[in-house]
Image (spheres, rainbow, N blue to C red):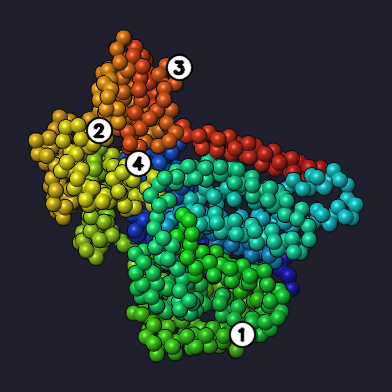
């Protein structure tokens, strides 16, 4: 019997699904208050978002950060959702409250998990699934192993983008359904003008969700969206034999990509020539789901060898495959019951499910790496398939099937010792839950109870899983204290180069007791206290300084390059002076020191030594008489005053002597393509010193206010495209609503 539906009940249901996820996360926080505070969240995500919130409070679009050279181009890094209205709104709101670092991380993740669960619920309801099964789909989508172990606790960009995939899927399916209905009405002779009005709305549904997904900050999710759109188009064509049926959906998707144009144009431009574009082929073989790990979909303590970040095959407990036991058990029970009916009912979803599993098990190509990132999409489709089976056969013996599957997997796990260190506890809890479920099916065949068992079991099983198995999957955790928001013992007026060992070895909790990083500030943590560093966390490494000095992703510099810079380039006229570096931080384990005649030891502790250049901080804009990229030229010395070194631009008064040589100004900030310079109303070309920092040659006799503004082509073109698409969407929605009112 179909359930009564209304807009109010659907909104309430989505809200309930989100609230259940919030309750789940609060239970995890009660168990471990640092559960969302790991690895990239500590080194990268939270420091950058602190700077994003600061940028908006200053009235600036957070395109660039002045507090890191390696990770200066926030828009180009893509993972920080610079152009996502939702991500920025969440950051601004959360940073209004006096929360600690772990609490801010938890608030960000829980907010997006709420959106993900609500979207999965809406998607399931749109596919005519019952209220309880829609809750079940929402729980699996938001609380599966990959989302909790990686997206919500480490790679926030993956969660921020994937949170909108169910919504985009819902919008695309709604578009296809309405366009098919309009085509049928056309065959029945409905007025052409009326059909043209009704066709406006289907094309508008996917656009906002596609925009939020693309700007969320995870290229893999964009790839998932492309696969989803292709699958929906092929499915629709096979059913209608008319490619015009997918036209409104494709227009809506294109509109969404147009709204997100600045974000994807930025990363396309930024990644060219970056270290990421030159990554080794070995990265494509890391974190592939091995076929031997597939039993972990039933029992996630199953432990076999996986290829880790260093392509080493090490035992790994496959918590990211956890999906709550109910979903795979329901699918298996359905095939045991009547496989032909199941295939006929959900053959397209099963095809997509198999494709996603294969993609998660094969190497990647191009700029993409770590194929197991397809898993959250797989979990979502698995939940939908299982829900369809349960909708088709409500009295299916899923609990008994789950118990049988656990028994089948436990025997070889025990024989071949594949349970890892968590096997006893996890297996015992899983068996208890499955047994109780099976007894409910046998002795309490009440429809309402059976209807709610899949979401109840999923909730209980996943909660027990993450309490028994640490969900951080072995990624590093650091003892970063709240004192990182204070600059001491460093100086905010200086530019620092830090030489330290890889953070995952030098600063993780297993190796260092007590608070760490107050001096060295690994990764992008200098952004917490508005300290200017060359170092920074960047998976793309597109900045010239990152490529030239061989920085690594987590912010540490190549040891040999660091030693060379300190011992050979810290003197007068050296590259450090040209960059504007007037502070050096050296970790205790690094045995180098700068030239003592020019540098003074300012501070020393077991966390590192701080050296400051004698004579005070260097100016951020300087006029140089000679530079080695123009060995045969000498430049005039310009008078510089009133330097306004802002986030996305620099303004300075400049006065070049008349009748002499041109002046050459160097700017102590990282160079990126897209800088424009003007003095008065005259445009000046912007060059760079070896791709490290911008340089501007000012003509003799020039006088006035010189401005250096970061205004790349992708921002101009992308903003124009986005504005046009936004206008089309708003006008289309307004016209559709007004026309719909007239038709009523």
CA separation, marks 2 and 3?
Answer: 29 Å
Callout 1: helix, strand or loop? loop
Q: Earlier in the sequence, mark 2 or mark 3?
A: 2
Q: Which residue is mark 3?
A: 681
Q: Residue furthest front?
A: 632
- Nearest to the eye among marks 4 and 1: give it: 4
Residue plotted at (16% across, 52% down):
590
For label 3, the crowd category at 10 Å Cα-Cα, with few meaning under 14, some 14 to 19 and many 20 or more, is few
- The picture places residue 741, in percent across and down from the top left corner, at 78, 44
- The picture places residue 462, in percent across and down from the top left corner, at 47, 72
Looking at the image, residue 93 sits to the left or right of residue 652; the answer is right
Q: Which residue is mark 1?
A: 397
For label 1, the crowd category at 10 Å Cα-Cα, with few meaning under 14, some 14 to 19 and many 20 or more, is many
Q: Is residue 82 visible?
A: no
Point out the image quarter for the N terminus: bottom right
Q: Between residues 710 and 566, which one lies in front from this camera angle?
A: 566
Residue plotted at (81% across, 42% down):
742
Q: Which residue is mark 2?
A: 578
Tags 4 and 3 touching, CB below 8 Å: no
Q: Which mark is residue 544?
A: 4
CA separation, marks 4 and 1?
Answer: 61 Å
């Amino acid at each position: 019997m179909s359930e009564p539906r209304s807009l109010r009940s659907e909104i309430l249901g989505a809200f309930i699904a989100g609230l259940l996820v919030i309750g789940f996360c609060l239970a995890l926080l009660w168990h471990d208050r640092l559960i969302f505070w790991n690895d990239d969240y500590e080194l990268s995500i939270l420091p950058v978002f602190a700077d994003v919130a600061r940028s908006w409070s200053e009235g600036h679009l957070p395109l660039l950060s002045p507090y890191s050279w390696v990770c200066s181009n926030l828009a180009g890094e893509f993972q920080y959702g610079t152009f996502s209205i939702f991500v920025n709104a969440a950051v601004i709101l959360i940073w209004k409250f006096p929360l600690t670092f772990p609490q801010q991380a938890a608030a960000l993740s829980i907010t997006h998990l709420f959106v993900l669960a609500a979207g999965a619920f809406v998607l399931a309801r749109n596919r005519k699934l019952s209220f309880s099964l829609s809750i079940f789909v929402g729980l699996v989508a938001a609380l599966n192993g990959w989302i909790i172990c990686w997206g919500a606790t480490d790679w926030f960009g993956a969660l921020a983008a994937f949170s909108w995939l169910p919504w985009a899927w819902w919008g695309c399916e709604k578009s296809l359904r309405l366009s098919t209905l309009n085509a049928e009405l056309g065959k029945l002779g409905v007025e052409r003008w009326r059909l043209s009005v009704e066709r406006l709305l289907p094309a508008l549904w996917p656009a906002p969700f596609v925009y939020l997904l693309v700007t969320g900050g995870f290229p893999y999710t964009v790839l998932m969206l492309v696969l989803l759109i292709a699958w929906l188009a092929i499915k629709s064509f096979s059913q209608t034999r008319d490619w015009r049926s997918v036209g409104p959906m494709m227009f809506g998707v294109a509109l969404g990509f147009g709204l997100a144009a600045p974000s994807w144009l930025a990363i396309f431009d930024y990644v060219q020539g970056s270290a990421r574009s030159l990554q080794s082929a070995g990265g494509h073989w890391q974190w592939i789901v091995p076929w031997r790990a597939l039993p972990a979909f039933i029992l996630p303590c199953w432990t076999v060898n996986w290829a880790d970040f260093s392509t080493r095959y090490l035992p790994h407990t496959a918590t990211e495959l956890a999906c709550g036991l109910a979903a795979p058990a329901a699918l298996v029970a359905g095939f045991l019951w009547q496989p032909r009916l199941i295939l006929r009912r959900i053959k397209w979803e099963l095809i997509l499910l198999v494709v996603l599993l294969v993609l998660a098990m094969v190497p990647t190509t191009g700029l993409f790496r770590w194929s197991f990132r397809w898993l959250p999409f797989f979990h979502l489709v698995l939940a939908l398939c299982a829900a369809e089976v349960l909708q088709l056969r409500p009295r299916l013996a899923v609990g008994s099937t789950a118990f049988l599957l656990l028994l089948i997997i436990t025997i070889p796990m025990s024989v071949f010792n594949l349970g890892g260190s968590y096997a006893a506890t996890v297996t015992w809890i899983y068996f208890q839950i499955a047994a109780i479920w099976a007894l409910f099916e046998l002795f309490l065949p009440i429809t309402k109870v059976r209807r709610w068992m899949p979401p109840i079991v999923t909730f209980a099983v996943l909660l027990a899983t993450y309490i028994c198995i640490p969900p951080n999957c072995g990624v590093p955790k650091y003892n970063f204290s709240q004192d990182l928001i204070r600059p001491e013992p460093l100086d905010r007026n200086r530019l620092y180069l830090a030489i330290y060992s890889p953070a995952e070895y030098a600063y993780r909790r297993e190796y260092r007791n007590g608070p760490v990083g107050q001096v060295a500030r690994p990764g992008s943590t200098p952004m917490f206290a508005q300290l200017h560093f060359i170092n920074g966390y960047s998976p793309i490494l597109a900045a010239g300084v990152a490529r030239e000095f061989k920085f690594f992703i987590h912010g540490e510099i190549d040891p040999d390059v660091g030693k060379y810079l300190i011992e050979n380039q810290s003197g007068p006229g050296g590259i450090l002076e040209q960059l504007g570096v007037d502070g050096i931080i050296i970790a205790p384990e690094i045995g180098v020191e700068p030239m003592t005649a020019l540098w003074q030891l300012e501070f020393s502790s077991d966390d590192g030594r701080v050296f400051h250049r004698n004579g005070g901080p260097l100016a951020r804009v300087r006029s140089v008489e000679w530079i080695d990229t123009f060995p045969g030229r000498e430049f005039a010395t310009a008078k510089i005053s009133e330097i306004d070194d802002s986030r996305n631009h620099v303004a300075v008064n400049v006065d070049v002597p008349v009748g002499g040589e041109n002046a050459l100004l160097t700017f102590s900030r990282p160079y990126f393509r897209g800088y424009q310079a003007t003095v008065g109303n005259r445009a000046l070309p912007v060059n760079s010193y070896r791709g490290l920092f911008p340089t501007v040659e000012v003509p003799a006799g020039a006088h006035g206010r010189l401005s250096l503004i970061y205004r790349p082509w992708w921002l101009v073109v992308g903003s124009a495209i986005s504005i046009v698409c936004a206008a089309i969407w708003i006008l289309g929605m307004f016209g559709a609503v007004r026309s719909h009112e007239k038709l009523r």
